[in-house]
Amino acid sequence: MTKLILKLNTTKNFLLGIFLFGLNSFPVFAEKPFADIHLHYNWDQAETISPAEVISKIKKTNTRLAIISSTPTHLALELKQKAGNWLYPIFSPYTHELGKQDWYVDTKLVDKVEQGLKSGNYFGLGEIHFMAGFPPNSKNKNFKALMNLAKRYQVPVLIHVDSGDEKYFLDICTKHKKVKILFAHAGGNLSANHIQEILTTCSNVWLEFSARDPWRYGGLTDESHYLLEEWKIVIIKFSNRILTGTDPVWRVTRTQSWDQVDDGWDHYEKLHQFHQSWINTLPSKIQEQIRWTNAREFLNLKP
Ligand SMILES: [Zn+2]
Ligand SMILES: [Zn+2]
């Protein structure tokens, strides 16, 4: 009990609400501008929620900057056209509904990506998924060509890797040192030690914690949404390269059924609150970096 009172005394008022009423029943959003750097508006989400509803949900949380990618690619651009300049689409190599399954053998893909970057409408590439032991791997021709385009057009790449240790991703970031890489979900199942190794070795890597919430990968916080000590150390040490986002795709694993709608946007507010709660336990300068300024630097925007 003493521990609980101490914790309550050291947190902001809205965290008190979370303790007393639970995350789901007490929707409190950011008092300060928030940057959500991992959003999707995929075809299987577009079947359940309209662009107007998505935009309204994002705005209610005081999110003033967001990075979004879609399957198929063009949906992100359509959302931006309705939302305005605060939404930054990145070019998804999944150009059709099942593109996640064949992008790496599509002989026209590299041209399509280059056209997208040339248009000036896209601010990066991704999300690109790898799973250790399954095709494609990072030696794939299309992947290498996309990394070369990222280097030439000086845009960042969002990469998702599912593997048992840090080696798979280290191989990517050391081979593409001139590309700014955003490592999705802090590697999903990777530990703080793995991540420390990656951030130390590759200064081109930025880290984000989407889907590290208790309902998906987890492993970032305790049940009260306080950062685990080992993560706190990494975040404070590399605070200028840490970002976060909600990734409102409800089934993040490959076992999801491709023909079912994804109701991830129904959980968006809860995911947003989770990230606010762990950010708010950090020193205020670092809160500001993760919530806002790092995202602007990541996109090379003016302060
Ligand atoms: Zn992902
Ligand atoms: Zn994602």
Image (spheres, rainbow, N blue to C red):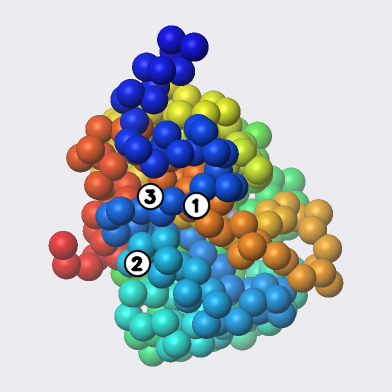
Residue shown at the point (49%, 12%) measured from the top left? 1
**Residue type highlighted by circle 2:** Leu
Quadrant location, ligand no. 1: bottom right
Pick the front one: 149 or 101: 101
User: Closer to the N terminus: mark 3 or mark 1?
Assistant: 1
Where residue 65 is drawn, which disc sits there? 2
Ranked by sequence position, the earlier of labels 1 and 2 is 1
State the CA–CA distance, disc 3 to disc 1.
22 Å
How far from the left and from the top, in percent, is residue 119?
Answer: 38, 89
Q: Amino acid at mark 1?
A: Pro
Q: Is residue 282 above or below residue 125?
A: above
Q: Position of residue 122 (x, y in %)?
A: 41, 79
User: Which residue is rendered at x = 16% and y = 62% of the image?
Assistant: 303
- Camera sees residue 51: yes
Quadrant housing residue 180: bottom left
Q: Is residue 194 above or below residue 30?
A: above
Of helix, strand and loop, which one carries label 3? strand
- Quick one: SS at disc 1? loop
Question: Local crowd at mark 3 within 10 Å, few (<14), some, or many (≥20)?
Answer: many
Q: How far, Cα to Cα, is label 2 from label 3?
A: 12 Å
Mark 3 against mark 1, which lies toward the viewer? 1
Res 243 label: 3
Residue holding disc 1: 27
The nearer-to-camera label among 2 and 3 is 2
